[in-house]
Amino acid sequence: MSSCLKIGHRLLDDGQVISALVQYKLLDSLVGQVLLDEVIQEVPLSKQELFHILMGGADAPIPDDFEGFLLQWCQHQGVQPDYFSAVMLRELRVQKFKQLRFAHQVESEFLRIKSDLDHVEYSLIRLTNLTLAQELYFQLRDDGVEFAYLAQQYSLGRERLSGGWVSPVSLSTLPIAVATLFRSEQVGVIHGPVPVSDEFWIVRLEQFIGARLTEATRVDLVDRLYTQWLQSQVKKMIETPGMIAVQSGAAE
């Protein structure tokens, strides 16, 4: 008798589950997790490491009855032992795998993409009329008109509500032409009109916030490297003929 997956009031048989994975674009995620299971089998996680993690780094001796300790910890945390073994332990192995595989690459990756991690605060006026953009630029540069005043009067975006001020954003999120201007780190210099799609931007760099390799940045970079690696492994698996197929019969 075939089994079904119940979701709300729907029952999905084997074929419908497979169809749903493809339809909802979840197959890549499933393939990635299956591949990951094979990799983390080789990742050691000692009792000492596990005890240290669960106790929040507390310096205490490992109990002789370690299985009993795990059951007590699960009970105290409101976690089912089966869930702890199947899900939480797996996630701890994944996190250790990330560190073993990618932590040593963090410094070089940071240097490679540092310019994309830099942030800026800037003032902005967006227009679609080139003649008006040129006129406002000269008013700002030559006549000393307040940037905030002109932004409130003329800018087309939400930045007009803040007098043209845009709070810290990553350089990587800005149009290439604008990001290139800001990488000079010349605070207070007015640039424009800069063509951006069908608009013309007038910008002034207010603050350049250079990226630093903080602990939070290290975590982000490890996750970035891990994600890139996993995506490449999934892509390789999917593109290899015969590696993914629907077959009848029990799974091996």
Image (tube, rainbow, N blue to C red):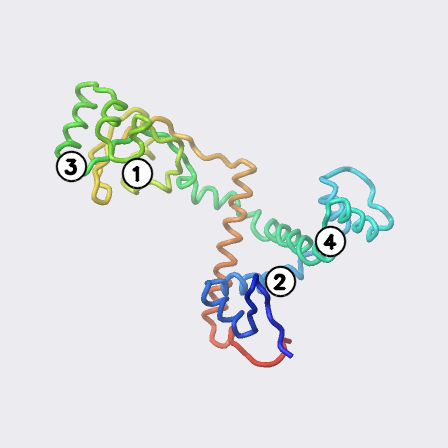
Residue placed under numbered mark 1 in the picture: 180
Residue in the image at 21% along x and 23% along y? 140
Residue 200 appears at what percent x and percent y? Answer: 21, 37
Q: Which of 145 and 22 is in front in this view?
A: 22
**Could you tell me how far apart the alpha carbons at marks 2 and 1 are, in whole angstroms?**
43 Å
Crowding near the residue tagged with mark 2, few <14, some 14–19, many ≥20 C-alpha atoms within 10 Å: some
Crowding near the residue tagged with mark 1, few <14, some 14–19, many ≥20 C-alpha atoms within 10 Å: few
Residue placed under numbered mark 4 in the picture: 80
Residue 116 appears at what percent x and percent y? Answer: 40, 41
**Could you tell me how far apart the alpha carbons at marks 1 and 4 are, in whole angstroms?**
53 Å
Comes first in the chain, label 3 or label 4 = 4
Count how many numbered circles sit on residues in the image. Answer: 4
Comes first in the chain, label 2 or label 4 = 2
Residue placed under numbered mark 2 in the picture: 37
| 73 lies above or below 211 | below
- Determine whether the residue tagged by mark 2 lies in a helix, strand or loop: helix
Crowding near the residue tagged with mark 4, few <14, some 14–19, many ≥20 C-alpha atoms within 10 Å: few
Mark 2 or 4: the one toward you:
4
**Could you tell me how far apart the alpha carbons at marks 2 and 3 are, in whole angstroms?**
57 Å
Q: Nearer the viewer, residue 20 or 40?
A: 20
Within the image, what quadrant is residue 112 found in? top left
Comes first in the chain, label 1 or label 4 = 4
Residue placed under numbered mark 3 in the picture: 129
**Could you tell me how far apart the alpha carbons at marks 3 and 4 are, in whole angstroms?**
63 Å
Residue in the image at 45% along x and 35% along y? 211
